[in-house]
Every structure is written in C-alpha cells, then in structure tokens.
C-alpha cells in the first residue's frame, strides 16, 4: 500500500507540475507578444527548432508548438508514457535508496548482540534496522534453533523474495520503453496516410502538402524515441542499483552464516 501511495503521489506531482507550467505559458503568451520587439536584446537563450523557417523561439515554446503539430492524440499518449514511466522509476529509486544498509555495521551489531544477549537481542537489532539485508538476517535468526543448514536455506529463499521486491515495477517501465516509440511510429504511419489523402484531394503532388504532412508525421516518432531514451537511462540506472544491492546481500549473507556457525560452536 505504501508503494502504491508513493507511486500515485509522484505521478500526481509530475502531472500537476506539467499543468502549472502549461497554464503559465498560456497566461504569459499575450504579454510576450506585445513586448517581443523590446525584449529581443534581453531575451532568454533561444533554440531554432524551425530549421529553414528563420524563426527563433524559446525552447519551451518550440517544444509546445511541436507537440501541437504532432497531434494531440498520439503526443498525449506518449507524454502519458513518460509521466507514468518516470513515476515508476522515481518510486524504484527511492525504494532502493531506502534499501541501502551499512552491512558491515549491521553484522558487527548482530555479532555483538549474539555475544551479549543471544538470538533474541540479535532479532531486535534486525527489527530496528531497515532494508532487505536486515530482513534476511531476521528470517535466518527465526530458525537459528534448527541448525545452520536450515538458516542457510532460509537466507537463500528469502533473498530471492527480496530480489523480487526490488525488481517490482521494472516490467512496467520496460513496457513504456517499448510502447512509446511504437506509438510514435503508429502516429507517423497515420500521418503519412493523411498526407497522401491530402495529395489525393489536391489532385497533384504539391511540395508544400507533402512536406507539411511528412513533418507532422515524423514529430510523433521523434517524441516516442526521446521518451524511450529517457526511460531507458533510468531503467539501466535502476538495474545497476539492484545489481549492487544484490552483491551486497550475497556477501553479507555469507558472512552472517559464518557468524552463526561461530555462535553455535560456543
């Protein structure tokens, strides 16, 4: 339930921020038009996304124009893929950040607790420590009276559970990475069909009709590819974090088993 709440909160925040930015742009548009001649020298850095048109506009305004030109239908779906994918990615990053544990310090604390108060005190140390490593140790301590072999099997089994929890939601991010460019290509194909319909209606192949239709069609492909690349970067970062945590879990689990062997020999 906490994960669902975190995901909804992140998605809502990103959507609210996007709406606020859009509203501000619409409110500022008339004033900017009246003062454009006076503000030329002091204007913010501009980017020419209208190659060949001779027009220079601010980056955010150019992106908004391209979004409208690409078609609200398909471009909105692509933006939704970006928002949902980013919300899932941020939720995973926060979850993994909270899962990070100083395993050396935890092992020392568990070993000291075993020497001073036995299994129960070691359980208390694990209960008061966040992260998957502490949970794995706790599950092993629950079965300490059944022998080291049972403890080791328990650690291996529960480690797999913790890995599944860390990878939760990655399949959805992968889905958005795949579907964003697919939506872009679909928009391009439909845009090309509309361009050919316009050519057929005009009765001849006009360069303006062909160029205009093709430009609008290709904008959706560009948008889909950009969204996929952004999400892919976050996806690979999350995978790298999970790999690092997995190595840490395996190493600390081996050391924990060694600690339990020493404790049982006393």
Image: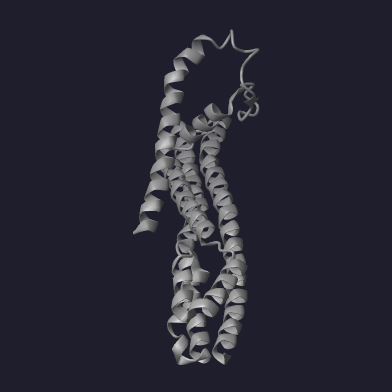
Residue 82's x, y, as percent?
Answer: 48, 47
Q: Is residue 37 left or right of residue 173?
A: right
Quarter holding residue 44: top right
Q: Where's the C terminus, which quadrant?
A: bottom right
Residue at 50% of width from left, 81% of height from top?
A: 155
Residue 179's x, y, as percent?
Answer: 48, 55
- Camera-side residue: 104 or 136? 104
Please tell me whether residue 58 is drawn above or below residue 18 in the rendered image. above
Residue farthest to the left, as pictured: 1
Residue at 62% of width from left, 71% of height from top?
A: 247
- Answer yes or no: is residue 243 visible: no
Tally of numbered tags: 0
Residue at 54% of width from left, 39% of height from top?
A: 214
- Camera-side residue: 57 or 109? 109
Q: Is residue 85 left or right of residue 101?
A: left
Residue at 34% of width from left, 59% of height from top?
A: 1
- Answer yes or no: is residue 170 visible: yes
Residue 36's x, y, as percent?
Answer: 56, 12
Please tell me whether residue 151 is drawn above or below residue 138 in the rendered image. below
- Camera-side residue: 153 or 258? 258
- Camera-side residue: 20 or 143? 143
Residue 235's x, y, as percent?
Answer: 56, 57
Please tell me whether residue 153 is drawn above or below residue 172 in the rendered image. below
């Amino acid at each position: 339930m906490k994960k669902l709440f975190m995901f909804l909160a992140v998605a809502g925040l990103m959507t609210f921020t996007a709406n606020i930015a859009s509203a501000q742009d619409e409110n500022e548009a008339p004033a900017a038009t009246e003062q454009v001649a006076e503000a030329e020298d002091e204007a913010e850095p501009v980017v020419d996304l209208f190659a060949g048109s001779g027009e220079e506009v601010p980056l955010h305004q150019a992106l908004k124009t391209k979004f409208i030109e690409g078609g609200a239908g398909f471009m909105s779906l692509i933006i939704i893929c970006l928002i949902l994918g980013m919300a899932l990615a941020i939720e995973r990053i926060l979850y993994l950040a909270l899962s990070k544990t100083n395993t050396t310090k935890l092992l020392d604390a568990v070993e000291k607790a075993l020497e001073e108060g036995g299994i129960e005190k070691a359980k208390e140390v694990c209960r008061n420590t966040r992260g998957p490593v502490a949970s794995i140790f706790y599950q092993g301590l629950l079965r300490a009276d059944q022998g080291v072999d049972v403890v080791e099997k328990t650690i291996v089994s529960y480690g797999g559970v913790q890995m599944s929890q860390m990878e939760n939601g990655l399949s959805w991010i992968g889905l958005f990475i795949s579907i964003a460019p697919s939506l872009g290509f679909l928009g391009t194909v439909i845009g090309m069909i509309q361009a050919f319909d316009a050519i057929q209606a005009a009765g001849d192949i006009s360069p303006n009709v062909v160029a205009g239709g093709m430009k609008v069609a290709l904008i959706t492909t560009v948008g889909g590819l950009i969204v996929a690349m952004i999400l892919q970067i976050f996806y690979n970062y999350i995978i790298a974090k999970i790999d690092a945590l997995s190595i840490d879990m395996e190493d600390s689990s081996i050391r924990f088993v060694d600690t339990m062997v020493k404790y049982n020999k006393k």
